[in-house]
Image: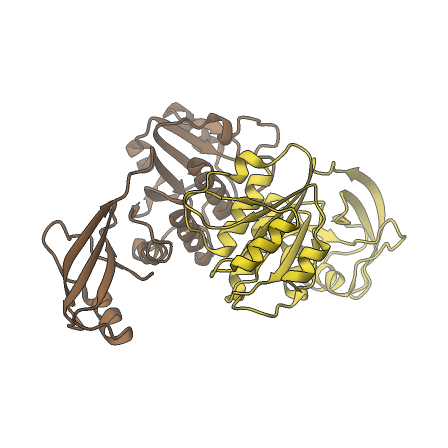
Chain colours: A brown, B yellow
């Protein structure tokens, strides 16, 4: 099933944007009368029929709407972008496949990558949402400094994940059945002692993702997978 | 920590192979007297001192041996190789990071990729083992047909994972605390009805990896992550 994306359907925008229109009309050669499936990324799937197969502004008429319940927990991962950009994009793709509400790139003391284009991660998330037929599109923040992130971080349950072979406070056991969950994943060189102390002062609980030493993007995937169990 | 690999240390082979020697001597410029860390991929870490910095046959003397306990379950994933080879390589890398004992590429009815070089997956696993400082190297089989795989598949607990939104037999609940576990992951187009029937006749239990529709490599990662919890 091919899924198109139009976030503003309820605001009355009943046409695809530039890129989606080009894909529908020029690439897939869908014409007037053809039925398409869409999501607004806010929990709704739609069936619609193309009314104007315009390659920049493909218009449609909604025939059916289906709401998808939100996941019982709000799932937010804050993660240090990896030096190799493929790896953090891969994390974004997998996180969307499993189900995620918000992703915040955080630049840490030991981060090798200090800059990342939110647009790139946004595109990756969008393509993953469409491929995995999800109705919920995560919020993807612009990269921010560690201090700014801590100042803004809001959640009922906040966790900082790091490598510690002796720590048996596993996220799998500490996660709750409801409420907003925020898991902070550090860079390859781990958090600095100062960062861990600041996080704890901000109400973050130290957790382990298991005894294995995981790459940043793997730790991110482990965390989002656990939040979804 | 840099980890070198020599599987035959106990067989008396106290030198690195061609490639590892070149890396140690030509790239890293390690010389006689330098201490190195090694694993034999069979649960042992070694500390050793270089005795001959030969670029094709770097010899060493073992000074210390440390055994790492085997994981309480034997973890075997059989998985349909993805059309895009990067994806199945990602799976291998992540599986080794989490911990895995055996990987079998299985060619299914709906497989888009019918051939895969075991050597490629072997190299990926090796590099992941060294990077994540593991002492256990998984067995990686040559790709085999679905029928051949079923004929050979041995495990105390055998599972076939597939997409079914109504199935609540989650692997997370059905996995046991001990014994060998084998999880079979299908291609993007899922297993054929015939394949599912054959698997059930061979003692495979149908399981779900959750309500989300996952790509093949993501399903593989979910499964191995669960087996390691």
Left/right of residue B12 with respect to residue A38 in the rendered view: right
The vertical placement of A64 against A206, above or below, is: below
**Quarter of the image where the N terminus of chain A is located:** bottom left
**Quarter of the image where the C terminus of chain A is located:** top left
Kindly tell me whether residue B131 is visible in this rendering.
no
Residue B22: give x, y in percent of width and height: 73, 64
Residue A96: give x, y in percent of width and height: 38, 49
Kindly tell me whether residue B68 is visible in this rendering.
yes
Determine the residue positioned at 28% across, 73% down.
A28
Left/right of residue A130 with respect to residue A34 in the rendered view: right
Residue B79: give x, y in percent of width and height: 59, 56
Determine the residue positioned at 22% across, 73% down.
A25
Residue A83: give x, y in percent of width and height: 46, 54
The vertical placement of B39 against A181, above or below, is: below
In the figure, residue A20 lies in which quadrant?
bottom left
In the figure, residue A121 lies in which quadrant?
bottom left
Seen from this angle, which residue lies furthest left?
A12
Determine the residue positioned at 37% across, 34% down.
A182
Left/right of residue A109 with respect to residue B117 in the rendered view: left
Name the residue nearer the viewer: B34 or A114.
A114
């Amino acid at each position: 099933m091919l899924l198109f994306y139009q976030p503003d359907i309820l605001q009355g925008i009943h046409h695809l944007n530039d890129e989606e229109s080009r894909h529908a009309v020029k690439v897939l050669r869908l014409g007037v009368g053809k039925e398409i499936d869409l999501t607004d990324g806010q929990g709704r799937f739609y069936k619609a029929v193309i009314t104007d197969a315009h390659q920049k502004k493909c218009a449609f008429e909604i025939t059916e709407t289906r709401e998808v319940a939100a996941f019982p927990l709000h799932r937010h991962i804050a993660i240090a972008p990896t030096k190799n950009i493929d790896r953090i994009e891969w994390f974004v793709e997998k996180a969307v496949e499993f189900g995620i509400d918000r992703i915040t790139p955080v630049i840490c003391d030991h981060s090798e990558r200090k800059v990342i284009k939110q647009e790139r991660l946004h595109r990756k998330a969008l393509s993953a949402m469409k491929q995995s037929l999800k109705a919920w599109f995560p919020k993807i923040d612009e990269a921010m400094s560690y201090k700014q992130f801590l100042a803004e971080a809001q959640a009922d349950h906040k966790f900082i994940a790091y490598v510690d072979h002796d720590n048996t406070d596993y996220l799998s056991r500490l996660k709750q059945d409801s409420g907003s969950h925020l898991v902070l994943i550090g860079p390859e060189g781990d958090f600095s002692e100062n960062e861990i102390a600041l996080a704890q002062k901000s109400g973050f609980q130290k957790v382990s993702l298991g005894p294995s030493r995981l790459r940043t993007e793997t730790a991110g995937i482990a965390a989002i997978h656990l939040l979804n169990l």
